[in-house]
């Protein structure tokens, strides 16, 4: 029976199952003409691909996979990730400096926002791939001469489990760290250290809180823009934020080393995912 003229022709089926039962039923729908779209985890796909004996003749997958996946289209979607489902943001109750701000969470579809912090010292949240949220907390506001310093903290999506991540030495005219990007496994965090006439990219070990400049800790250093999914490569531009002839778009190993020139005389890069 042709899949284009079968009794289920024109029917679209979204398959969210794995291994046997769900994929088995969706396979029959595909054989009867339905347009079956199979959703798979980006981290390896359906476990059935590697179940039991693997055959080079079918792309190194299992024979089970070759049977159950026929007449289907496969796409990868991380349904565990909060991106696209909810938004996390900071909001201050006035325009005063330092800001009296807190972090909130709201559904991307709209609705009532939920306050995740209530200390009026929290801002710059960045949602991580494992569900953790990294954010800035303003500290030592009463003891520092000009302004509080930024330190990075972690919390769960419900605002619980708040944990300090970094302990940073911040000069009086400097502000401290701002989160920029996560690695896909959530173990590495790219941040930017900033303040008066100073900016440079910093790598943070999320498990230990240890930090190090990606390149030199200079006044007009590397501006980190993105982190490769495996956490091995930092993308950004040299020469600080201010436009000038010394800027260049580069890639730099996470462990440091000589930058690889990508675009000379350029800045403010953005990478596709």
Image (tube, grey):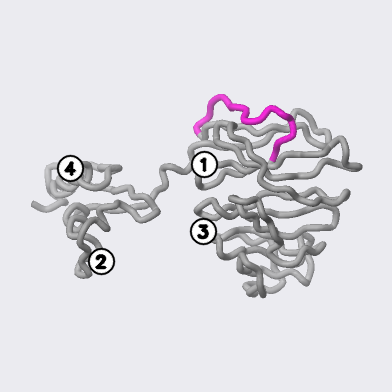
Which badge, 3 or 1, comes first in the chain's sequence? Answer: 1
Residue 161 picture quarter: top right
Q: Give whichever of 75, 176 is nearer the camera.
A: 176
Which badge, 2 or 1, comes first in the chain's sequence? Answer: 2
Q: Secondary structure at mark 1?
A: loop
Q: Residues within 10 Å of mark 4 (few under 14, many from 20)?
A: few
Q: Which residue is mark 4?
A: 25
User: Residue 77 at what x, y percent from top left?
Assistant: 39, 48
How many marks do you count on the picture?
4
Name the residue furthest left.
1
Identify which residue is drawn at 69% across, 74% down: 264
In the rendered image of this protein, does residue 127 appear above or below residue 200? above
Identify which residue is drawn at 28% across, 48% down: 37
Which badge, 3 or 2, comes first in the chain's sequence? Answer: 2
Q: Residues within 10 Å of mark 1 (few under 14, many from 20)?
A: some
Which residues are the magenta region?
109-123
Q: How far apart, in angstroms, are the residues tagged by discs 3 and 1?
A: 16 Å
Q: Which residue is mark 3?
A: 229
Residue 271 picture quarter: bottom right
Q: Which residue is mark 2?
A: 60
> Can residue 112 be found in the magenta stretch?
yes
Q: Which residue is mark 1?
A: 131
Which badge, 2 or 4, comes first in the chain's sequence? Answer: 4
Q: How far apart, in angstroms, are the residues tagged by discs 3 and 2?
A: 25 Å
């Amino acid at each position: 029976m042709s899949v284009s003229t079968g009794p289920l022709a024109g029917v679209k089926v979204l398959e969210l199952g794995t291994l046997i039962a769900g994929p088995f039923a969706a396979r029959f729908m595909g054989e009867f003409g339905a347009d079956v779209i199979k959703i798979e985890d980006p981290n390896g796909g359906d476990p059935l691909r590697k179940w039991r004996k693997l055959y080079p003749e079918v792309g190194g997958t299992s024979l089970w996979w070759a049977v159950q996946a026929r007449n289907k289209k496969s796409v990868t979607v991380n349904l565990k990730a909060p991106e696209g489902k909810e938004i996390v943001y900071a909001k201050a109750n006035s325009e005063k400096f330092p800001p009296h701000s807190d972090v909130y969470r709201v559904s991307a579809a709209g609705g009532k926002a939920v306050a995740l912090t209530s200390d009026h010292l929290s801002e710059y949240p960045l949602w991580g791939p494992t569900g953790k949220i990294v954010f800035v907390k303003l500290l030592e506001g009463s003891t520092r001469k000009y302004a509080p310093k930024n330190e990075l903290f972690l919390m769960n999506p419900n605002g619980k489990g708040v944990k300090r991540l970094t302990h940073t030495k911040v000069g009086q005219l400097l502000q401290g760290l701002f989160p920029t990007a996560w690695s896909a496994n959530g173990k590495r965090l790219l941040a930017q250290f900033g303040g008066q006439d100073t900016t440079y990219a910093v790598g943070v070990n999320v498990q230990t809180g240890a930090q190090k400049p990606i390149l030199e800790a200079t006044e007009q250093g590397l501006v980190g823009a993105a982190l490769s999914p495996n956490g091995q490569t930092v993308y950004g531009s040299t020469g600080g934020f201010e436009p000038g002839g010394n800027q260049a778009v580069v890639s730099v190993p996470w462990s440091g080393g000589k930058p690889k020139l990508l675009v000379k005389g350029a800045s403010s890069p953005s990478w596709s995912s």
